[in-house]
Image (cartoon, helix red, strand yellow):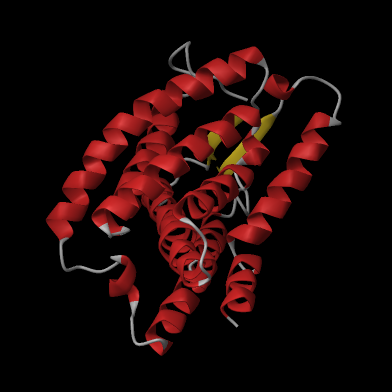
Amino acid sequence: MVRNETLLVLGLSLGASAISALISFTGSLTRPGGLGDQAANLNRSMAPDRPWLDLSWQLFGIATALVPVLLVGHLLMRERAGMGAIGFDLRRPWFDLGRGAVVAAGIGGSGLLLYLGAQQAGFNLTVVPESLPEVWWKFPVLILSATENSVVEEVIVIGYLLRRLDQLGWSPMASMAASSGLRGLYHLYQGIGGMIGNMVMGVIFVWLYRRWGRVGPLVAAHALIDIVAFIGYALLAGRVGWLPTA
């Protein structure tokens, strides 16, 4: 039952994203031209020139992406544990934010350097963090999108998955490999550099989760990394020479 439940949760969320990323990467590899000449668009308009309809689609996408997290919370409540069992609560907000900021500062800079190097070497697509129109809701939606990404990924691939693998009797090393490998795979749509970078991030996050017993700092760190990436790209794209654009 635990194994089947875990596969179903992953099939509704990041497991499906991993398969989608693999198909996308296969398409990129078989397309004429190198990976560096192609782009991976993350936050793009869903209804160009129709800002209110576009906003509705953006909010709908963010809300529905969080449903698997609600499912995880429901399943944890059924075993009389709840989200507090994985440290996704408000009991230690300053601890979560403080540790998260430190982790984000350490990983964010090195991750950017890895991406730039991989993109120049032709191992990565050009990642376009956002291509939304210049409307009033652009930056709030980017912040919401970054927060959604962080909650979905860290709650499911760290807190939930590691808890279930522990219950299934997996060793800590095997659980770390599964969690970080899955994280890398669902980022494969970005290219080899994106996969490797996220696998390394996954190993660090698993280690920190085992040490702190809380997913909260990892959600904060991931959200800060993505917020800086999304908003930074929106402000700097086309204005600095070192930032690749599609």
Q: Which residue is at the far top?
A: 241
Left or right of 12, for residue 177: left
Q: What is the tally of numbered marks visible in this picture? A: 0
Work out whether residue 14 or residue 50 is closer to the camera in this orientation and state it. Answer: 14
- State the quadrant of the N terminus: bottom right
Q: Is residue 188 above or below residue 53?
A: above
Question: Which quadrant does the C terminus fall into?
Answer: top right
Residue 2 lies, with reference to residue 10, above or below; the image says: below
13 and 203: which is toward the camera: 203
**Residue 219: percent from the left, percent from the top?**
34, 54
- Of 193 and 228, nearer the camera is 193
Residue 38 falls left or right of residue 114: right
Q: For residue 239, which quarter of the picture?
A: top left
Front position in the image: 60 or 137: 60
- The answer to whether residue 136 is visible is no
Which residue: 38% across, 85% down?
A: 77
Residue 3 visible: yes
The residue that appears at 63% across and 54% down in the rendered structure is: 47
When the figure is inspected, residue 238 is found, relative to residue 180, above or below; the finding is: above
**Residue depicted at x 63% and y 35%:** 190
Give how far across and how far down residue 189 sits, in percent.
67, 40
Q: Where is residue 169 in the image (x, y as percent from the top left)?
A: 51, 67
Give x and y (percent) for residue 161.
Answer: 49, 63
